[in-house]
Image: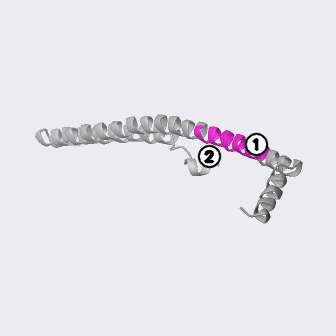
Amino acid sequence: MTEEVKASAGKAWRLLDSQGVTRAVQLVAIASLFLALFVGLRQYALADCLATYSDDNARSSGQRLIAAEQDRKALDDMIKGIAGARSVSPAEAQAQVNAALDKYLAVRAQSDEQRRRNPPPTPPSQRCS
C-alpha cells in the first residue's frame, strides 16, 4: 500500500472511532430498539384483536347455523304437513295446511330473531386498526 492510502485508511479509522460516530450509532441503536418495541406492541394488539374477532365470529356463526337448521327443519315439517293434507277431507286438509304454515312462520320468526341477536362481527379490517 502506498503511504497516501495508509493515511486515508488511518483517517477513516479515526473518524469511525470518534465519539461523534459512537454517539450516532448509539442513537440509531436506541431508536431501533424503540421502533422494534412499538412494532411488537402493535403486532400483539393485532393478534389479540384477530383472536377476539375469531371468537366472536365462531359464536355468531354457530348461532346463525342453529337458526338455519331450525328453518330447514320447519320447512321440511311444513312440506310434510301439506303433503299429508292430500289424503284427508278438504276441511281437515285446510286445517292441516294452516297449522303447518302457522308453525313454519312461528319458527321462522324465532330464527330471524336469533339471527338478529347474533349478527356477524365487524370485519378485522374495520375493528383492528
Q: Give the residue type that dot 1 points to.
A: Phe
Residue indicated by mark 1: 34
Q: Which residue is mark 2?
A: 128
Confirm whether the magenta stretch covers residue 45: yes
Disc 1 and disc 2: Cα gap in Å? 22 Å
- Residue 70 in which image quadrant: top left
In the rendered image, residue 97, in percent from the top left (x then y), is placed at: 25, 42
Q: Crowding at label 2, few (<14), some or many (≥20) Cα neighbours within 10 Å?
A: some
Secondary element at image label 2: loop
Q: Residue most toward the right? A: 19
Residue 106 point in image, percent of width and height: 39, 38
Residue 110 image offset from top left, x and y in percent: 43, 37
Callout 2 amino acid: Cys
Residue range of the region highlighted in magenta in the rendering: 29-47
Main SS, magenta residues: helix
Q: Is residue 8 left or right of residue 98?
A: right
> Where, by quadrant of the figure, is residue 15 drawn?
bottom right
Q: Is residue 4 left or right of residue 89?
A: right
User: In the image as oriented, which residue stretches furthest toward the front?
Assistant: 2
Q: In this rendered view, identify the residue nearer to me: 74 or 117.
A: 117
Q: Is residue 89 visible?
A: yes
Where is the N terminus found, in terms of image quarters? bottom right
Residue displayed at 23% across by 38% down: 96
The one of 66 and 85 positioned closer to us in this rendering: 66
Q: Residue at x 65, y 49 (%)?
A: 129
For label 1, the crowd category at 10 Å Cα-Cα, with few meaning under 14, some 14 to 19 and many 20 or more, is few
